[in-house]
Image (tube, rainbow, N blue to C red):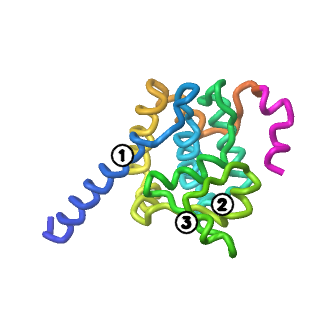
């Protein structure tokens, strides 16, 4: 292997290890048990990258992403928490690999320590989120993506690697939970 390729391979291994640790150390709310919002959001984004629905490093808070998030929530979510995608979409920036692109007029708000608390506030202030360039490239590679998913699932949903693989291959929800039967979509409109 030529010297340059060897150095790149070492850098890739180090970077992959860095993101694996970031995925394992996500800061989640633990007030009412572990809130799985951030891991579920990551699984949703990863699925959209795998399916080539997200083809550039711009993650919009779209109805497709929301539906995928709610699909994963129906299998992996917590009964002690509401399946609100807007909070992890905003707060994932604490992981230092998830970044926010503000809508015009909201740059100061996004860069301040102020917290956005509702779906409407997040939609109004944030145009899209984007990942570190290197992480986005890793997610486009099937082998590296699979490694990161395995790390994420092993940490946050132990013993459910096969279930997550099944979920990612389908658009089916588990028997619709209460939040889907009781007009939960109205929160997003």
Residue 11 position within the rendered picture, expressed as x and y whole percent measured from the top left: 24, 61
Q: CA distance from mark 3 to mark 1?
A: 26 Å
Marks 1/2: CA–CA distance: 23 Å
Could you tell whether 16 is left or right of 161 in the image? left
Q: Image point 49% across, 27% down: which residue?
A: 160
Question: Residue 75 appears at what percent x and percent y?
Answer: 63, 28
Q: Point out the stretch of residues depicted in magenta.
A: 178-189
Secondary structure found at label 2: loop
Q: Which is nearer the eye, 172 or 36?
A: 36
The secondary structure that most of the magenta stretch takes on is: helix
For the point 38% across and 44% down, the residue is 147
Residue at the spot x=67%, y=31% of the render? 74
| Quarter of the figure with residue 179 | top right
Badge 3: few (under 14), some or many (20 or more) residues near its Cα, within 10 Å?
few
Q: Which residue is mark 2?
A: 60
Residue 181 is covered by the magenta coloring: yes
What residue is disc 3 on? 111
> How far apart are the alpha carbons under marks 2 and 3?
18 Å
The correct choice, above or below, for 18 with respect to 150 in the image is below
Q: Is residue 65 above or below residue 130?
A: above
How many discs mark residues in the rendered view? 3
Res 20 label = 1
Nearer-N-terminus badge (2/3): 2
Q: Secondary structure at mark 1?
A: helix
Closest to the observer: 103 or 131? 103
Structural crowding at the residue carrying mark 1, measured as other residues with C-alpha within 10 Å and reported as few (<14), some (14–19) or many (≥20): some
């Amino acid at each position: 292997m030529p010297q340059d390729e060897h150095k790149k391979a070492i850098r890739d291994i180090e970077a992959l290890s860095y993101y694996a640790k970031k995925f394992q150390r996500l800061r989640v709310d633990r007030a009412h048990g572990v809130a799985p919002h951030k891991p579920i959001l990551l699984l949703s984004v990863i699925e959209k990258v795998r399916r080539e629905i997200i083809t550039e490093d711009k993650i919009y808070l779209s109805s497709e992403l929301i539906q995928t998030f709610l699909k994963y929530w129906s299998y992996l979510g917590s009964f002690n928490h509401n399946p609100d995608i807007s909070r992890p979409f905003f707060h994932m920036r604490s992981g230092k690999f998830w970044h926010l692109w503000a809508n015009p007029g909201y740059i100061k708000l996004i860069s301040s320590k102020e917290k956005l608390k509702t779906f409407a506030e997040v939609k109004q202030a944030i145009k899209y989120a984007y990942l570190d360039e290197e992480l986005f490239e890793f997610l486009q590679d099937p082998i590296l993506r699979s490694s990161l998913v395995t790390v994420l699932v092993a940490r946050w949903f132990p013993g459910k690697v096969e279930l997550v693989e099944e979920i990612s291959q389908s658009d089916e929800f588990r028997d619709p939970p209460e939040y889907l039967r009781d007009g939960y979509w109205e929160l997003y409109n």
